[in-house]
Amino acid sequence: MSDLVTLRRDGNVGVVTVDNPPVNAIKTAVRVGLIAKLGEAKADPDVAAVVLACAGRTFMAGADISEFGKPMQGPATVDVIAAVEQMGKPVVAALHGTPLGGGLEIALGCHLRLAAPGTRLGQPEIKIGTIPGAGGTQRLPRLVGLEKAMAMILTGDPITAQDALAHGLVDEIVDGDVTAAAVVFAKKVVAEQRPLVLARDRNEKLANVDRAKFDELAAGYLKRGKGLLAPMAAIESLRNALDLPIDDALRREWTLFLGLLGSEQAKSLRHIFFAEREAAKIAGIPADTRPREIRRAAVIGAGTMGGGIAMCFANVGLPVTVVEMSAEALGRGLDTVARNYRSTAARGGLKPEEAERRIGLITGTTDMGGIADADIVIEAVFETMDVKRQVFAALDKLAGADALLATNTSYLDVNVIARATARPQRVVGMHFFSPANLMRALEVVRGAETAPDVLATAVAIGRRIGKAPAVVGVCHGFVGNRIQRLRTVEAERVLIEGALPQEVDAAMTEFGFPMGPLAAGDLAGLDISWSMRKAQGLTAEIADALCERGRYGQKTGKGFYRYEPGSRAPKPDPEVEQLIVATSARLGVTRRSFDKKEIVERLLFPVINEGARVLDEGIAARPGDIDVIWVYGYAFPAWRGGIMHWADTLGLAYVRDRLIEFAARTGDERHKPAPLLTRLAAEGKGFAAS
Ligand code: COA
């Protein structure tokens, strides 16, 4: 047998240790090893108690997700938990890192749980389209109460060790080596002959549950997870904790879990999980390329983007200098950042002292020399080539020799910007999405001369600040905005051909976007894309006409919709309808009705097609990279796996055939199926096989 699981003795305590780097995922061999070693510990008369611990950076972080979707082999996690519960001797879990999913469920099977201070505990299954399948929906509420268990299982977000202690999920937080502390603790438990109590037998927290409150909370979670299968199953299973004997409820949980595992939603979410991690692997750089350490950052520009980017660094404890031209603009920018943090604290999202600590990490200056000791400088100034080049020429003179110089441009040619310096190899694009402190997408733009270590550093720091970076090549709008443009154009066309804004948006929200593209345009400000179009000599019949009438979106109370004063709720506007109908008439278009499916396909299939071109040109290395960018930057529903994965689920031949129809109708060359799409469709393959 392998050394994935070992048993050693420390006095009268048997220490069972899992060592399956990097995250001690509970793959088949781990389950087999655990059952074997727990069995040995049980049989050994000299072992009076057991500590269950893990080597490396974390306690078991859950099932091995790569085994999902394959036939189950060997014992299941429930069998491991049965072995723990039937030990007949105290079992203490020694938790550190991220005990998640099945890892937490095994810990829930133990009699007692100790945690290291920074431990984060959670049931993240909902994020991959399933529910805890090894008792999480039954044992967790018995320990922490139904409401807390609901929050953990329905959001999937982990909680801190302190929170876990306060809710009875862990028994103690211990400093120093958690395994050693657990051994001492286990010896004490034996010496004191503490009674063995299992979570499954502790019903006191479920005794007086307020049913009406449960129903109300459940309705809220279901509303948020509209269209998703896993939240429904999670609620059902949590309700069973109240209504069924635990063994029946556990069997039902397992059935629900298995049913979800094979669902398209779960497959899509697993795809995105792995695509995000795959995207962080940079194609075509030497395998031994190491990212440089970032200890200090600088951001040029204290506008919305600059401020948001500065927050990303402060959020992970890195000091950051913000440089602005005028003291006034700097003050405004820093005030906004401070206000953001304080309002998060006021809403309970952050401890007030933590908010102040982060504010304190951000310092401002009007002296460009303030960047001298920064390891990374991110430029977030006005989106004009001349301005960017001036900034980079200045950075070149002032930045440290090894500093990484990044531009946050969303469209411009990174190579031209890089050539404003004498060190283009140290220049890279880092395209953040707005609001930069919240959106997880990050396009790392590889210039013609960008050095491998610069790319690796940009990706590594992106991961560190919580983003989902993907490396892209230089072209107008890179991947995300380049392919999005097709959707914008198509939304206009569909309006002119017969749909109304509220129909377009309803089709897209029903598909799974949190907001329709037209309402999103109103929110962002229609004038911004208008000025960009003008700069590029482009037009958009409807959107231009709206802007000409001063309808810039929410900020003017009118855009594609109208807005009551102080309200953000879009209301259909007869004036806009008239304008659209008149435009159709002027262009000689006979209006017709659209159903939702056609709207979705018209808006998104051209995006897929452009995605195929982006792949063909090598602008994106993998279809999964495009998926990651669109899920985290454009709110494409993660449960559909990203735009290219979704295309694969539909079948590329279908997408190709519809594009041919669209091309015939619109006469748009870009609707003609791209060569890669055509080839894969003919071969009966998906992008995943490209
Ligand atoms: N199954 C299989 N592989 C996993 C895994 C899992 N549950 N969790 C992580 N990995 C892999 C990742 O794919 C990655 O592989 P790679 O290095 O080949 O790309 C590696 O482990 C490290 O993971 P990463 O996410 O890059 O590390 P991190 O330190 O940023 O985060 C976790 C660690 C555990 C917090 C994070 O990986 C995570 O959330 N994992 C999923 C946990 C989960 O959902 N468990 C329940 C499953 S039901």
Image (cartoon, rainbow, N blue to C red):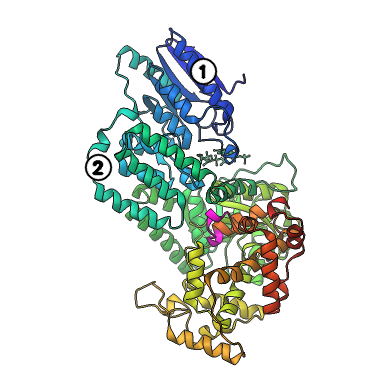
User: What amino acid does circle 1 point to?
Assistant: Lys
Residue 553: percent from the left, percent from the top? 46, 77
Question: Who comes first in sequence, dot 2 or dot 1?
Answer: 1
The reply to whether residue 97 is in sight is: no
Q: Residue at x 51, y 14 (%)?
A: 8
Q: Magenta span covers which residues?
A: 633-641
Question: Could you say whether the residue bearing mark 2 is in a helix, strand or loop?
Answer: loop
Residue 339: percent from the left, percent from the top? 38, 60
Specify few, some or many for label 2: CA neighbours under 10 Å numbering under 14, 14-19, or 20 or more.
some
The reply to whether residue 589 is in sight is: yes
Q: Determine whether, in the image, residue 271 is placed left or right of residue 103.
A: right
**Residue 384 tag number:** none
Q: Classify the position of ligand 1 by quadrant: top left, top right, bottom left or bottom right.
A: top right
User: What amino acid does circle 2 point to?
Assistant: Val
Foreground pick, 331 / 434? 434
State yes or no: discs 2 and 1 in contact (Cβ < 8 Å).
Answer: no
Q: Name the residue that disc number 2 marks.
A: 209
Specify few, some or many for label 1: CA neighbours under 10 Å numbering under 14, 14-19, or 20 or more.
many
Residue 150: percent from the left, percent from the top? 36, 45
Quadrant where the N terminus sits is top right
Question: Could you say whether the residue bearing mark 1 is in a helix, strand or loop?
Answer: helix
Give the residue furthest to the bottom.
586
Is the CB of the residue bearing disc 1 within 8 angstroms of ligand 1? no
Q: Determine whether, in the image, residue 233 is placed left or right of residue 55.
A: left
Q: Residue at x 44, y 20 (%)?
A: 51
Disc tally is 2
Q: In which image quadrant can residue 540 be found?
A: bottom right
Foreground pick, 39 / 120? 39
Q: Name the residue that disc number 1 marks.
A: 37
